[in-house]
Amino acid sequence: MTVRVDLNISLEGFAATADQTPEDPIGRDWMRLVAAYTGTRTMQERVFGDTSGAGTTGVEEKYASAYFQGIGAEIMGAGMFGLHLHGDDPEWRGWWGDEPPFSCPVFVLTHVPRPSIAFDNGTVFHFVDASPEKVLRRATEAAAGADVRVGGGVDVVRQFLSAGLVDRLHVAVVPIVLGQGIRLWDGLRGFEDGYDITSEVAESGVTHITFTRR
């Protein structure tokens, strides 16, 4: 079992953007940050439901396809589920649609208890108030030998990195300057110690850097 993280970051290291508005809760900067990734064939099919075969291939597609392989459970923050916008709505089922692209148990970190939500494709959102270590134990048990992915947001990922719980970190460094947001690396000086590092440049100009625990 491997604990995995996959993130897109800007040249300055921003992994979360700051230009969202009530009218545009995702924001233009986020779409710039993930454009190459979401344009791949795998992401078009798994996230957007386009089964026509449309989408890019090549290096970006290799990482996008690997993103979904071997995952038995997911951990995410309340913001990634959408609770920051709909925390008072007991009927809110997340902004992933009727077929969330996880197909596995997902543990959402939140201080507000909610009943679990199950979808027909195997995705089940569980809402838990727990430390990284405790929620990882639950996710590991649920994954039944498969990998656990810490999906985000960046604050959640930093907690797991700081606690030394991540076995493999893949960051896609996108050649754009955001100028604002939340940085991945703050407080993680020397994180690379104890990891083997590889890098690969995609046709889009995105540099994929992978840290794998020795």
Image: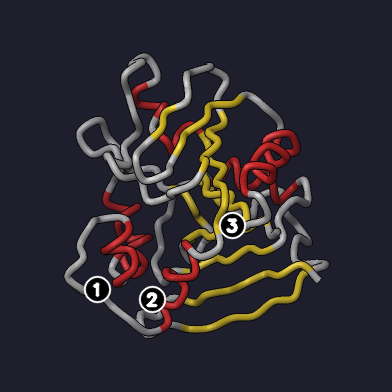
Q: Is residue 111 above or below residue 46?
A: above
**Rendering coords of residue 110 (x, y %):** 55, 25
Q: Nearer the viewer, residue 140 or 34?
A: 140
Q: Secondary structure at mark 1?
A: loop
* Residue linked to disc 2: 61
Compare marks 2 and 3 and give the one earlier in the sequence: 3
Q: Quadrant of the C terminus?
A: bottom right
Residue 153 is left or right of residue 185, and the answer is left
Q: Which residue occupies 47% across, 19% down?
A: 115
Query: At label 1, which amino acid type do we have?
Result: Gly
Q: Is residue 24 above or below residue 73?
A: above
Q: Which residue occupies 76% across, 67% down?
A: 213
Q: CA distance from mark 3 to mark 1?
A: 23 Å
Q: Secondary structure at mark 3?
A: strand
* Residue linked to disc 1: 55
**Rendering coords of residue 104 (x, y %):** 49, 46
Compare marks 3 and 1 and give the one earlier in the sequence: 3
Q: CA distance from mark 2 to mark 3?
A: 17 Å
Query: At label 2, which amino acid type do we have?
Result: Glu
Q: Residues within 10 Å of mark 3 (few under 14, many from 20)?
A: many
Query: At label 3, which amino acid type do we have?
Result: Val
Q: CA distance from mark 2 to mark 1?
A: 9 Å
Q: Which residue occupies 75% across, 66% down?
A: 192
Compare marks 2 and 1 and give the one earlier in the sequence: 1
Residue 5: which disc?
Answer: 3
Q: Are marks 2 and 1 in contact (CB under 8 Å)?
A: yes
**Rendering coords of residue 98 (x, y %):** 27, 39
